[in-house]
Image (cartoon, rainbow, N blue to C red):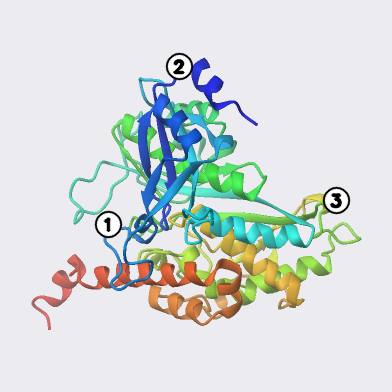
Amino acid sequence: MIDVEAWMKERRITEVECIVADINGVARGKILPGYKFLKSISDDSLRLPESIFIQTVTGDYPDGDVIDPTDRDVRLRADTSTIRMVPWYDEPTAQVIADCYHHDGEPVEISARYVLRKVLALYEEKGWKPVVAPELEFFLTRVNADPDYPLEPPIGRSKRAETARQSYGIDAVNEFDPVFEDVYDWCEAQEIDVDTLTHEGGAAQMEINFNHGDPMDLADQAFLFKRTLRQAALKHGIYATFMAKPMEGEPGSSMHVHLSVYDQESGRNLFAGNERDAYSPLFLNFVGGLQKYLPQAMPLLAPNVNSYRRLRRWSTAPINVHWGWENRTVGLRVPASSPEARRVENRIAGADANPYLAIAASLACGWIGMVDGLDPTDPITGSAYRLAQTLPQQMPDGMKKLNSSTPLKECLGEQFVKVLLAVKQAEHEAYQSVISSWEREHLLLNV
């Protein structure tokens, strides 16, 4: 148990950011002087309105009473195990992730962190321990002050913008060394355990990999990493974006999640079979659950209207839930590994997804498969793009599937699913009210 007061005194902390992830993964919370933060821990005085958990990405709220209409306060309680420095400020500042509780001590069930905790409790009841490893893709772009103007790659050290695709290009990554030097330094200061950095297929598109570990810890790290990268990019006069499809003609950005399950007592990987390349029955059940329920969990994996622009045939993103060995065209890839490291990679989630909810959805679908003994289809060889698209292609399709999924509502929480669907419906209606430049270009004088 960390001695927060001693930790802050040692680092001469003057200010603390107490943050929570809202339903879209946006960091919200309160900033307060260090001594007041310590006081809030002892007297449980830090509060926020419950409505932050139903705020849309545009800053609006759904119509109707999806939660208590009085907009009551909830108590903001810091998870002191998550306290970290904020390395980009001049003044010594700390940040800490918080959980929210009602006045009667019950957790706020519509908070993203609670939803993941609820799913993890299902595994704990079975004596299972899930392990995850996220991979986040993102684009660096020039500063874009006009939202009607398409994004462009930024100028690197060569003083030229990238124009050709440079998958795994070392020199292409080195163009932005000053940014990534800050990213690695700042991640180390925050104990964000990032692993490899690679250049992806898009112009100035990169991917950062996290080392595998506890799902809650990795969700916290991914949540903090997004903020860290944006701040590092801004320091160097460019943007970093986790939009699923920020540029026309470029591939989209994903959040691949590697998933495995271990026995809590023995530490044995429950996905490993008896032979080197064999799969266990529980592994097959897990994949069967992913296949059946991931299309119903799309509002958690592809949460925005832009998300579905990424999920297109021949676009380096999946269009269905087929699975296969070392196959990057499928929704569920099984990487080559030793039995001890047997895992499945969910390639469906976009980089724009809330990491808590994307991990919770992936684990919930797999848990249902394991508990219900679901069988997967046969693994495929060759390209999955030759097969039918079975993932929802638009936001309303995904919402409809989730609304009809009783098993997922039970795993994630019915109240949470109700709120999520209300928020996404409000966002979709806001999007539908906007007339795009494509419509003005092609319809204005032609129809």
> Residue 23 versus residue 143: which sits nearer the camera?
23
The residue where tag 3 is placed is 265
110 left or right of 135 in image: left
Number of residues whose C-alpha sits closer than 10 Å to that of mark 3, classed few (under 14), some (14–19) or many (20 or more): few
Q: Which residue lies furthest to the right in this view?
A: 274
Disc 2 element = loop
236 left or right of 165 in image: left
Q: How many marks?
A: 3
Please state the horizontal and vertical placement of residue 234, each as a whole percent of the image. Answer: 32, 34
Q: Which residue is drawn at 58% across and 43% down?
A: 209
Please state the horizontal and vertical placement of residue 227, each as a whole percent of the image. Answer: 41, 40
* In this view, 341 is above or below 348: above
The residue where tag 2 is placed is 12
267 left or right of 40 in image: right
Number of residues whose C-alpha sits closer than 10 Å to that of mark 1, classed few (under 14), some (14–19) or many (20 or more): few
> Residue 290 versus residue 83: which sits nearer the camera?
83
The amino acid beneath tag 2 is Arg
Q: Residue 59 carries which label?
A: 1
Of the image marks 1 and 3, the number of the one nearer the N terminus: 1
Q: Distance between the residues labelled 2 and 3?
A: 41 Å
